[in-house]
Amino acid sequence: MSNAFLFLASYAINAAWQIPLLGTVGWGLSRLVKSTGPELQHKIWVAALILATLTPATPIFQRYFTHQAATALANVPRSPMFAPVAVHQVSLAGAEVVLPPVAIYLVCGLYSAALLFFSLRLCWTIRCTAALVRNAEPTSIEPDYLAMWETSKKTFGVREALLRHSHDIPGPVTAGFRHQVLLLPATFLAEHSQREFLAVAGHECAHIRRNDFRKNVFYEAAALLTAFHPVTWFMKSQIAQTREMICDRIAAEGLLDRRSYGQSLLQLASKMPTAPPPLVFHTMAMFDTNVLERRVMSLMTSIPRVGRIRRYLLAAAAILLLSLCAGVNGWFTQSVAAKTSNPSTQSDSADKKAQKAGPDLDCTYYDKGVPHPGTCGFDPKDKTKYRCYLNADLTKSQMQIGCQSKVLKAMGEKK
């Protein structure tokens, strides 16, 4: 069976049990640092998502690095008493899960179908998002709104951000690959107050300053390999929720006080249409996560001041614990092997072939560190000495201790 099928099945099977463990550890760490604010929680969930993607691939990494090490050893000149390492004999490290070939093909088929589905969905949503930004129209706004928009861009250092309107969105969103764009519904300015517009501008400018749109696309692409798992969906939802809470705090502290910003959030949410949008885009929308109550409570909760050094230490400790958990999971990762039809029959046939081939007298003759094929035998002058004779030139030989056991074994089989 091809190694590609074995690697694919191994990744899917290991991901099934490793992702919940990493998700549980991430949830526990997120709860422990909740009092420090959403920033550290966000970093923990991002790290958990990336580690959940990499950890199930441990057998592939082991195979690659073991193969590289074996290749390097094989190219190093050896002394005569050591035999070279055969690269093709290197196997996957760790225990193996032996499955029938039918089961391996079934796992690979289901996993490949899920991977194809989520990949096509990601490509489709990115395409729709690009079309949404491309078809958006410039917005003509009153001087008061324009002044608030310019103030928001200046406050958050995003002077190149653009303001557009679209008929295809239910609420304000941020998108754009090359240029970041704030998109408003076509009737937004007519239906909302200046304070609500300022809250929207501040929140979306915070997304633009943090480069959240491009990060979100990267997270979606990185999680494609584990997108079939419900725990991955949970991790991505936690990333989105903590990201919105971070931008709420940035907007409230930069433009409005927390109470005014919280009231604006509630007013904006009450005016949002209840019907879902016709398409789902990878945009930064204010009300995509449906956790308005949690966002307002987090905004109103005072966070104790945490020094920069302590914050870095907490972040480093949390990431270290997550990495240790991923390392333990990787240690117990099992590769997949195909079940043979009749092992005893195969071993008997292999023994018969070995017997027909005759005794094993092969050895390696080294000429200035370069290995050459040779044959073990006696020294004609002193039969108590065993030598390795060069096959290309039997007049050349060298003492090798390993030849003694092979010659004696061959003599026993002959008798």
Image: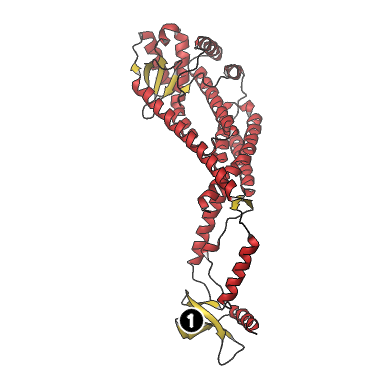
Given residues 408 and 310, the one toward you in this image is: 408
Left or right: 392 with respect to 86?
left
Q: Name the residue under label 1.
A: 390
User: Which quadrant would residue 201 be assigned to in this image?
Assistant: top left
The percent position of residue 163, horizontal first and vertical second, equals 37, 18
Q: Which residue is drawn at 61% across and 23% down?
A: 303
Whether residue 108 appears in this view of the structure is yes
Residue drawn at the location 59% of the way across and 53% of the way down: 338
Residue 110: percent from left, percent from top: 54, 39
Question: In the picture, residue 193 is in which quadrant?
Answer: top left
Along the line of sight, the residue nearer the viewer: 322 or 398: 398
Q: Which residue is drawn at 61% across and 19% down?
A: 302
Give above or below for 187 relative to 18. above
- Amino acid under disc 1: Leu
Q: Nearer the viewer, residue 312 or 14?
A: 14
Question: Looking at the figure, which quarter contains the C terminus?
Answer: bottom right
The image shows residue 131, relative to residue 270, as above or below, that is below
Q: Position of residue 202 (x, y in %)?
A: 46, 18
* Residue toward you, 218 or 92: 92
Colouring chosen for the image of the structure: secondary structure
What secondary structure is found at the residue carrying circle 1? strand
In the visual, does 138 lie left or right of 230?
Answer: left
**Residue 106 rendering spot, x and y as whole percentages:** 56, 43
